[in-house]
Amino acid sequence: MIIVLKHGVTAQDVEQFSASITEQYAVKVNAWYGEYSVVLGLLGDTSVVDLEAVAAQNIVASVKRVQEPYKKASRHFHPEDSLLNLGGGARIGGGALGVIAGPCSVESEEQIVDVARRVKAAGASFLRGGAFKPRTSPYAFQGLRAQGLELLRKARQTTGLPIVTEIMAANHLALFEDVDVIQVGARNMQNFELLKELGKMDKPILLKRGLANTIEELLMSAEYIMAAGNERVILCERGIRTFETMTRNTLDVSAIPLLKEQSHLPVVVDPSHASGMARLVEPLSMAAIAAGADGLIIEVHNDPPHALCDGPQSLTPPQFDALMEKIRRVAPVLGRTLSGAGEARE
């Protein structure tokens, strides 16, 4: 349930009214202070709340029942877009278009540092790289694990780019304390025990949509993280499994405006995994930005033919340069600011 209070209410009014609601109906009340109004979100069994009695209170402007089971992620409770700011120009959301780029997996210090330097020079504001790799085959390269995380930190030290990397299990959390943005991969989107543990951290979480999950299921997974206390969540559309076989997955472009309509959380798109083909990354990136995406996560490798993971979908640094130049021209037309690009090109 959402309660919008009248303009001009004081913090004391809000506190007293919230306490009375909690005492009378045994629900939790969260307050959001906007520029022009105060919005209260009621969590718990709101079926017992007397809608008319609440609406009759002098400080109440309107009352509305929220049907969505995801309350913290819902735009009804948080009307304005969330902005995640990691400093140094690295921002996602609130009109800032953040580009995350780097190899699928960290292979060596030389490789990750070289790619980090080149994607930063092109205008990327985050560095991605897999240290722990979930692979369909148990015989495929599984990543350098803890060593890979150390190499990512060296790349960050060299370039200043915040690092984004995937966690596989809750017992790895201690290794990720120095990671700037923790990625939850598609296969772990409904690993609820992991999500609850990530909710206890004060660190941005990039949550990828599962390859066969609905939009509501993605939002409910975000709710798990937020309900545990961490509201710094980024949603990622990375393509879903359909009957189409010409591409690795099918990019659900419609998910972007739908997620933006339903939730205040930033939405990032992964055109690399969505297509599995490097030549499709540019057009899918343009489509994602036009549809309202707050960012892109793109695989870039300095030697794709010899990559240990996902070479066919990885851009070379020159290809990424060309894509960023096109994004730089398109973003202002759509009222977007390319996060970090100015700093990178000075």
Image: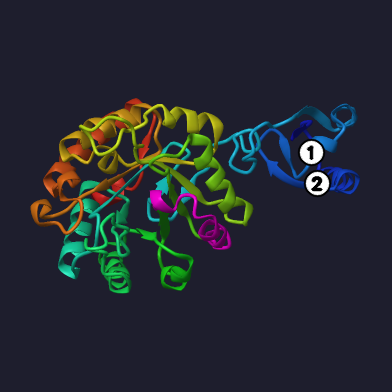
Residue 325 appears at what percent x and percent y? 20, 37
In this picture, is 127 found above or below 320?
Answer: below
Three-letter amino acid code at the position of disc 2: Val
Per the image, the residue denoted by label 1 is 46
Q: Is residue 334 magenta?
A: no
> Where residue 102 appears, x then y in whole percent?
24, 54
| Element on which disc 1 rests | helix
Query: Is 49 situated left or right of 294 in this image?
Result: right
Report how many numbered discs are placed on residues in the image: 2
Q: Quick one: 164 or 251, which is closer to the camera? A: 251
Residue span colored magenta: 185-202
Q: Position of residue 274 (x, y in %)?
A: 29, 38
In the rendered image, the quadrant that contains the N terminus is top right
- Was residue 186 drawn as part of the magenta stretch in this picture? yes
Residue 112 x/y as whole percent: 21, 63
Question: Do the CB atoms of the residues marked 2 and 1 lie less than 8 Å apart?
Answer: yes
Front one among 102 and 318: 102
| Label 2 Cα crowd, 10 Å radius (few <14 / some 14-19 / many 20+) | some
N-term-proximal mark, 2 vs 1: 2
Where is mark 2, residue-wise?
27
Between residues 292 and 171, which one lies in front from this camera angle? 171
Would residue 197 appear left or right of 138 to someone viewing this image? right
